[in-house]
Structure formats: C-alpha cells, structure tokens
Image (cartoon, rainbow, N blue to C red):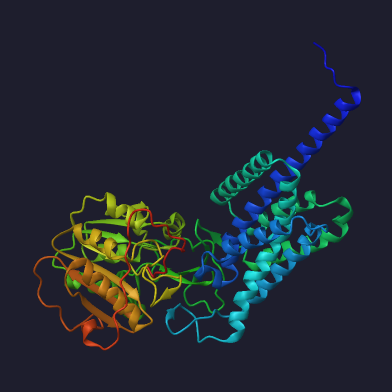
C-alpha cells in the first residue's frame, strides 16, 4: 500500500528528523567535551596549583556545579556559549597566578611546605573554585537547552553516549600518552567546531592564548604517571633542572648521583643507592647518616630474611632491606611509573635484584591476598601529600593507614616478627594518632623512635627484649597516654567498599 502522506508532509517530517539528528549530534559532542574537559581539569590542574592536590574532589564539585547552574539557566534567551573561550582563558590565567600563592591551612591540619594562613590564600582557593565552575556554565546551558528541544529519552541517550565516549577516550589518552597541551588542544578544536563561524575570528585568539598558558604551566620535561605530574631533578642542583636520562654507567660508577623525584612541584622521594661501598670516603659518612632511620627497624628485628615492603617507591627501603641481609623482599608499589623511574635513575638497580620481587598493586589489596610468613612488614614512609586533620576519622591516602589495615599486616608476621611504620610527622597529634592506631591493631604499646620529626613505630609479635632508649640517632618517645593532649580517633574502615579519592602518598623511599 502506498503512502498517503502528501509531499509537503513528507518533506516536513524529513526536515524534523534532520533537525533532531543535528541536535542529538550536538548534544553528544557537548557531553563528550564536558566530560573530557572535566577529567582534563582534574588531571592537569594539581600540577599547576598545589592546592588541588590536597583537595582531590575540589575540581570535580566545581565542574558539576558549573554544569548544573548552566542547565538551570538553559531556557535563557541569550546563549552564553560564545563566552566560553574568554571564560576558559580567565580560568587558565587565574591558575597561573594562583600557582605562586601558598595554600591555606589551620592549626588542626597538617600539610607539607605550608606556612601560616593568610587571607590571600583563602581568596585564591575560592577563586580557583569559581573560575573553574564558570567555564562549565556555557556548556551546561547549551546542554540544558538541547534537553528542552529533544524528547527526554532521545536527549538522555545522546547525552549518555557522549559522556561515556568522553570518559573512555580520556582514559585511553591518559593511559597511552598524557599531555595537558595535547588534551587542551583537542578540547579547543572541539569548541571551535561547536561555535558559529561568525564567532571564530574573536574566539580563536582567545583559545590560542589558553593553549599557550597550558603549555607553559608545566615543564615539557615532566613525566606523567597515572596519578600525578613527576619531575626528576639531581640532588644538589640549585636550579632544579628537570632530568630525563641519567649519565652513562650509572650502575657501576663511583659516587653516583642521587635524584629527587618531585610530584606536582614538591619532593616525593629519593632515587639512588645508599650502599656506602659505592661512595668515596668523603661522601660515605653522609650516606650512612641519611640511612640511619631506614636501618633502625632491622636493629630491632631478630630475624629479617623475608620482608614485605609496602609503599616501595623508588626502592630505597628495598635496598636497605637487602643490605641488612634480607633474602626475599616483596616490594609493593601502586604507581608503575615510579618503578620505571627507579629502574632508570636508581644506581642500585634494586628492582632488578633477584632477591626483590616487585608487585605493582594497591597495598591493602596485596595484604588481603598474601599468605604471610614474613619476618617484617614495613610501611615505607607513606607520608601523605593530601590533607591531614586532627578531626578526621578516616584517612584518604590509599586506604592503608587504618586499624584494619595494620591488623591485616600484623597477621602476616611470623612468630617474633616486627611491624614497622615510618612517617614524617609534623605535628604531635599526627604522631599520636598513628601510635594509637598501631596500638589498637596489635594489642600492645609499640616502641616509638623520633628524630627531627621522623617517627619510626615498631610493634613486636611474640617476646622481644625491651628496645634500647637510643638507636640510630633516634630516641624512644614516652607513651601517648603520658601527656595531657587528647588522643585523636584512630582511622577505621568499615568494609571493602571504601573509595579513596586522594593521591598516592608522600614518601622518601
């Protein structure tokens, strides 16, 4: 049977279908750009402004707020999408300015490299949040208007498809080769295509300036891990010039260089050997002094043939274990890039030592799967780069500093084994919190050694002699209950579904 529709009706239906398809494709592209840009912001901006590394979900909330506000004003007659290039440039400029502003803090919080609070630092915090949110308002408004123009089911289908595509593309881009300049260039290209051609002449110079700001925000020699921006510098270099390759013969040379690995512009850990036989007599004394804190737990452990190292980082802890006679070291490190950098810059080549078995894994997951049998379990200077607070009950850095985590580690020890936790504690309440956590996990008051802010906490399984009052340049601290300060609540985890949004922890290993 032939169609009864008139040619005019058929043309009208075809035109409506074409309009819906174009609107759907535009909604798909806008959702794609919004998700890709949001993930770009979360990944790139902590490398520009240290603040964002401390507040891991700041940019996520800000982006959602901007999209939401834009969707609310979606019915407004005047489109804001043409302002997107200017708003993006404002955001980039504000980030570049805020890079030089120190972060806000309070007496009940602990961050590294942070002085006392000032008003300008809180203004910077608010400015970062607002400037990022307004970038997403034009995107949210245009998405909201397209939702009004399409049927709900069709609109949600295009929106969900674009969001998933943006997330998957960014994941692949981040995994294979992440570059903030390349990522921002992709976003800018998409914005140009979405803008009317009549606005290109005004928009392209603004977008070009935004891309230039992104390019100069991070050194081209930066290395991007799955978690943060990494810069390697040679220790002692006052200019802190980034290094991409070590000198030839690093594994065999006398007096090899030690490298500082910096994440988001701040020190994270050393990559170098602490074997005194590799250094001349002039440098040997310094190396022996620097490794005293690492040697301390082995002086307390009667046996240390088999060791579990959590937060192995660049391999310093693992090398110290081997130098102290360990026959097997299971080195657990969550960031694969740190393992690769250790193989490149660590003169000891410790991760290629047959006694060391590297496991690129989350420490808590490894603890659940391990069958135990260790003489020592060492938490290797897992000092967080995220925010500490004396009022927080749950630590967010890696789901590892909890009572339950310590209990899992303690159960993996042999009889007469030793659990060791090393930490750079800048505040007394922070050290007391860690001591209380180990006490609850092990059922005993641990031995606590302190030297210049570095705390080494050791708990013993079975019977052990009393620890000496002074060891490796550190002295035993009194029991936390001996002071009048209130004991902070130790971190607890309630189940396997805890989600960590924080960056991996700060350590010197």
391 on left or right of 299: right
For the view shown, which residue lies furthest in the front direction? 4
Judge whether 483 appears above or below 141 on screen. below
On the image, the x and y values in percent for residue 496 come to 34, 53
- Residue 464 in which image quadrant: bottom left
Question: Considering depth in this image, is 422 or 331 the residue closer to the camera?
Answer: 422
455 on left or right of 123: left
Residue displayed at 70% across by 58% down: 72
On the image, the x and y values in percent for residue 351 come to 35, 56
Residue displayed at 40% across by 67% down: 272
Residue displayed at 35% across by 52% down: 359
Question: Considering depth in this image, is 196 or 304 the residue closer to the camera?
Answer: 196
For the view shown, which residue lies furthest in the top direction? 1
Question: Considering depth in this image, is 297 or 46 the residue closer to the camera?
Answer: 46
Q: Is residue 462 visible?
A: yes
On the image, the x and y values in percent for residue 252 come to 38, 62
415 on left or right of 221: left
Judge whether 187 appears above or below 158 on screen. below
Q: Is residue 292 visible?
A: no
**Split into 4 quadrants, where in the image is the N terminus?**
top right
On the image, the x and y values in percent for residue 378 come to 27, 65
């Amino acid at each position: 049977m032939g169609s009864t529709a008139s040619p005019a009706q058929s043309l009208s239906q075809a035109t409506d279908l074409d309009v819906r398809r174009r609107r759907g494709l535009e909604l798909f592209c806008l959702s794609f750009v919004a998700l890709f840009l949001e993930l770009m912001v979360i990944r790139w901006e902590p490398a520009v402004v240290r603040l964002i590394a401390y507040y891991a979900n700041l940019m996520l909330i800000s982006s959602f707020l901007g999209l939401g506000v834009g969707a609310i004003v979606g019915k407004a007659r005047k489109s804001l999408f043409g302002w997107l290039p200017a708003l993006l440039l404002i955001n980039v400029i504000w980030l570049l300015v805020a890079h030089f502003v120190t972060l806000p803090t309070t007496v009940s919080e602990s961050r590294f490299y942070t002085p006392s609070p000032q008003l300008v630092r809180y203004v910077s915090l608010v400015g970062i949040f607002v400037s990022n949110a307004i970038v997403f308002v034009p995107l949210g408004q245009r998405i909201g208007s397209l939702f009004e123009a399409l049927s709900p089911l069709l609109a949600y289908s295009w929106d969900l498809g674009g969001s998933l595509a943006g997330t998957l593309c960014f994941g692949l881009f981040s995994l294979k080769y992440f570059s903030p300049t390349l990522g921002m260039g992709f976003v800018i290209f998409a914005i140009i295509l979405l803008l009317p051609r009549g606005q290109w002449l005004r928009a392209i110079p603004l977008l070009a300036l935004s891309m230039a700001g992104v390019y100069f925000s991070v050194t081209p020699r930066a290395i991007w891990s799955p978690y943060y921006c990494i810069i390697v510098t040679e220790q002692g270099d006052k200019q802190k010039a980034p290094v991409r390759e070590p000198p030839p013969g690093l594994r065999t040379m006398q007096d090899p260089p030690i490298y500082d690995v910096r994440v988001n512009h701040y020190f994270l850990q050393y990559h170098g050997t602490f074997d005194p036989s590799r250094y001349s007599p002039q440098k040997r004394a310094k190396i022996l002094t620097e490794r005293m804190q690492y040697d301390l737990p082995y002086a307390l452990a009667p046996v240390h043939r088999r060791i579990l190292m959590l937060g192995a980082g660049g391999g310093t802890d693992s090398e110290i274990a081997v130098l102290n006679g360990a026959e097997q070291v299971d080195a657990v490190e969550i960031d694969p890039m740190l393992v690769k950098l250790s193989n490149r810059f660590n003169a000891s080549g410790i991760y290629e030592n047959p006694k060391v078995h590297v496991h690129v894994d989350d420490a808590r997951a490894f603890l659940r799967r391990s069958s135990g049998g260790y003489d020592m379990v060492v938490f290797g200077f897992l000092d967080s780069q995220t925010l500490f607070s004396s009022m927080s009950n749950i630590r967010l850095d890696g789901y590892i500093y909890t009572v339950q985590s310590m209990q899992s580690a303690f159960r993996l020890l042999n009889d007469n084994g030793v659990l060791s936790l090393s930490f750079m504690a800048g505040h007394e309440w922070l050290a007391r919190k860690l001591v209380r956590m180990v006490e609850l996990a092990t059922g005993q008051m641990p031995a606590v050694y302190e030297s210049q802010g570095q705390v080494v906490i050791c708990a013993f399984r079975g019977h052990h002699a009393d620890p000496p009052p002074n060891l490796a340049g550190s002295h035993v601290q009194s029991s936390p209950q001996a002071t009048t300060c209130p004991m902070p609540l130790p971190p607890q985890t309630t189940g396997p579904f805890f989600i960590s949004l924080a960056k991996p922890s700060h350590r010197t290993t």
